[in-house]
Amino acid sequence: MKIGLTGGIASGKSTVSRFLQSLGAKVVDADEIAHELMKPKQKLWQKVVGHFGEEILKAEQEIDRDKLGTIIFNNPQQREKLDQLTHPIIISEIKARVEKLEQSYEIVIAEIPLLIEVGMIDFFAEVWLVYLKRTVQIKRLMQRDDINREAAVKKIESQMPLDEKKEYADRIIVNNGSQEELEKQVQKLWRKII
Ligand SMILES: CC(C)(COP(=O)(O)OP(=O)(O)OC[C@H]1O[C@@H](n2cnc3c(N)ncnc32)[C@H](O)[C@@H]1O)[C@@H](O)C(=O)NCCC(=O)NCCS
Ligand SMILES: Nc1ncnc2c1ncn2[C@@H]1O[C@H](COP(=O)(O)OP(=O)(O)OP(=O)(O)O)[C@@H](O)[C@H]1O
């Protein structure tokens, strides 16, 4: 069974993935795949540097993700350009990995922040959404990325609003409370699918 796990930035997807992994799921992480594909000489590196220029590089030709993030989270046109360049390749890599793993594992979870935005809903048997209140999301994002409120809001607003995402989800995991409460919800969902 292929399950797509999504949510907003800093909503708790990776935390949920960790719980699912410890319960026995095999997890594929879209952010990790994107990072791999953007390493020097990999498929996306050339495309991204070709458009954004060498000023986004740091030592050893690595893409400086802080710099690239600052550009795209402050400029919707540049974000759209990056998405156009990267998403087709990221999507096909996710699909290939999930399909391969599905041959050996009962449950494969793909953690994909922009699953709904990129139109991957139908690839999965179910879509799970990690949801939280905007106030809690802003607070957690500010804390985790060590950024101010304005920067956190910009990142959140570069994605489809979570209330809209809810309409596409088969199951909703609410993460306003403690990590223990979150873990209990995940365990309950897990029991339903195995
Ligand atoms: C913008 C980049 C450089 C920031 O790197 P950084 O290491 O700081 O963050 P990380 O990659 O861990 O992403 C953190 C979160 O940002 C959000 N995010 C990332 N890219 C985007 C985007 N294009 N649009 C909206 N939100 C995004 C996601 O919620 C993601 O979980 C990096 O995320 C990137 O290269 N993004 C483009 C590829 C992409 O779209 N990835 C998402 C795969 S679905
Ligand atoms: N229930 C919780 N209580 C307190 N902190 C939490 C809770 N759930 C997650 N966090 C914290 O909030 C931050 C975001 O969580 P996490 O990294 O799991 O989100 P994410 O959705 O994977 O983020 P991203 O979109 O950036 O990949 C982390 O610092 C995490 O430790």
Image (cartoon, grey):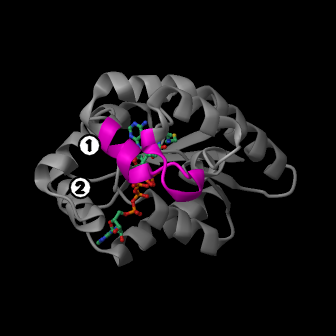
Q: Is residue 190 within the magenta segment?
A: no
Q: Which residues are magenta?
A: 55-71
- Label 2 CA crowd tier, 10 Å (few <14, some 14–19, many 20+): many
Q: Position of residue 132 (x, y in %)?
A: 27, 53
Q: Which residue is mark 2?
A: 137
SS type, badge 2: helix
Q: Is residue 3 above or below residue 74?
A: below
- Which residue shows up at 18% across the image and 45% down it? 153
- Which residue shows up at 58% across the image and 50% down it? 61
SS type, badge 1: helix
Amino acid type, label 2: Gln
Amino acid type, label 1: Ile
**Foreground tag (1 vs 2):** 1
Q: Is residue 137 above or below residue 56?
A: below
Residue 178 position by quadrant: bottom left
- Which residue shows up at 68% across the image and 41% down it? 94
**In 3D space, how far apart are the residues under numbered discs 1 and 2 (Cα atoms)?**
8 Å
Q: Position of residue 90 (x, y in %)?
A: 63, 36
Q: Which residue is mark 1?
A: 156
Determine whether, in the image, residue 141 is placed left or right of residue 48: left
